Image: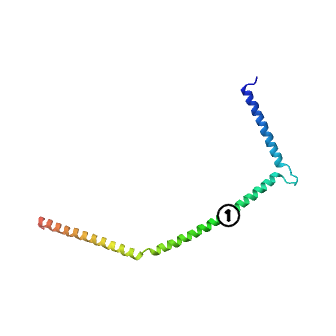
Amino acid sequence: MMTSKTKDEHYDLLTAALMGVAVGVLATLLIKQTTSGRRPIITGLSMAGRGMRKAGVAGMLGAAATGRTIARKVHQGVDRGVEMVEEIPFDDIADHVRDYFDAAKEAVEDTISGELRDLKKSIRRRRRRLGI
């Protein structure tokens, strides 16, 4: 009577033998010469090479088209950027900044002159108190 383990071993051996036969038949079919004198593996590689060549050409054409599209969009972006820069009112901005700094300067001068006036008053009071 066969145990389960020996039965599995027989199936494993049978599977390995069938796989070996399949690999051998495939290798023979690929390597043997056909009636035209060519080997099937060479024909397969040749067809694969043609397919890769076509794919390469298609990729190059796609990349060229993409490059042209990108170049066109970049030029459009540059043109739009130039238009936007031309629309910026630099003179008005300069006038506003100048007015802002003039107002700040006047505020600082007013504050300093007020502080200086208060300091002079304080010094006079101190001298009077000391009798100088």
Give the farthest residue toward the top. 1
Q: Is residue 21 left or right of residue 88?
A: right
- For label 1, the SS is helix
At horizontal 78% and vertical 53% (from top left) the residue drawn is 44
- The amino acid on which the numbered mark 1 sits, given as a three-letter code, is Met
At horizontal 72% and vertical 61% (from top left) the residue drawn is 54
Quadrant that contains the N terminus: top right
* Residue located beneath label 1 in the image: 60
At horizontal 20% and vertical 70% (from top left) the residue drawn is 117
Q: Position of residue 38 (x, y in %)?
A: 85, 54
At horizontal 49% and vertical 74% (from top left) the residue drawn is 83
Q: Residues within 10 Å of mark 1 (few under 14, many from 20)?
A: few
Q: Position of residue 122 (x, y in %)?
A: 17, 66
Quadrant that contains the C terminus: bottom left
The quadrant in which residue 67 appears is bottom right
Q: Position of residue 131 (x, y in %)?
A: 11, 66
